[in-house]
Image (cartoon, rainbow, N blue to C red):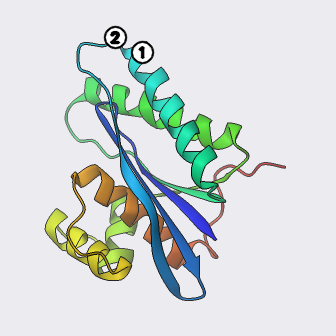
Amino acid sequence: MKILGIDPGYAIMGFGIIEKKGSSMFPVAFGSLETDKDTPMPGRLKHLYSGLMDVIAEYGPEEVSIEQLYFQNNAKTAIYVGQARGVAVLAAANSGLRIYEYTPMEIKTAVAGYGKADKAQVQSMVKMILGLDKIVKPDDTSDALAAAICHAYSGDVKKAMFLMK
């Protein structure tokens, strides 16, 4: 099964596709979609949507794992990231994919064994689990792969937030 992990963001949206075969996982593709800070928000959202639709069309994932939003301070940033997350959910839904969401703590626990693991710990575990030669950069891409890995470990027991009929 191919799983698309998404780390939502409006400046950088990370994506990572893994293939799960039995208890093994293999990287298929990963990267990030970046938007220009001088582009108005509707243009940034359109770019993210189009980019995700291209990724979905090219690699054919069957399920999507997306990180839930968690913000403490900046409401404006939370709104912008929420809009980008909505675009990611829309791209997946329009592609007929099953969509699952995980909290940052669930993702860190699944990948690093500790819900409060730092970025470096998560990145090291993503590298190890997927047998990569080096740490994946930027952080958003590594986080997207971590979301996909989390779903590979727990997707059989997690209820989809959206299920196409």
Q: Amino acid at mark 2?
A: Pro
Q: Which mark is residue 2?
A: none
Q: Which residue is mark 1?
A: 43
Asked whether the residues under the numbered discs 2 and 1 touch, taking CB atoms below 8 Å apart as contact, a structural biologist would say: yes
Which residue is found at the position 23% from the left and 41% from the top?
72
User: Quick one: 85 or 31, which is closer to the camera?
Assistant: 31
Foreground residue, 132 or 100? 132
Separation (CA) of disc 2 from disc 1: 6 Å
Counting from the top left corner in percent of width and height, residue 108 is at: 31, 69
Residue 78 as seen in the image, left or right of residue 38: right
Location of residue 20 by image quarter = bottom right
The residue at the point 34 percent across, 76 percent down is 111
Residue positioned most to the bottom: 23
Q: Position of residue 71 (x, y in %)?
A: 27, 42
Which picture quadrant has residue 42?
top left
Residue sitting at 37 percent across and 65 percent down? 146
Amino acid type at circle 1 is Gly
Between 158 and 31, the residue placed more toward the observer is 31
The structure residue drawn at horizontal position 53% and vertical position 74%, both measured from the top left corner, is 152
Mark 2, secondary structure of its residue: loop
Q: How many badges with numbers are in the image?
A: 2
What residue sits right under mark 2 in the picture? Answer: 40
For residue 44, above or below residue 64: above
Residue that protrudes farthest toward the right in the picture: 165
Structural crowding at the residue carrying mark 1, measured as other residues with C-alpha within 10 Å and reported as few (<14), some (14–19) or many (≥20): few
Label 1 element class: helix
Residue 114 visible in the current orientation: no
In the image, residue 62 lies at what x, y percent? 66, 59
Give the image location of residue 49, x and y in percent: 52, 30
Is residue 135 visible in the rendered image? The answer is yes
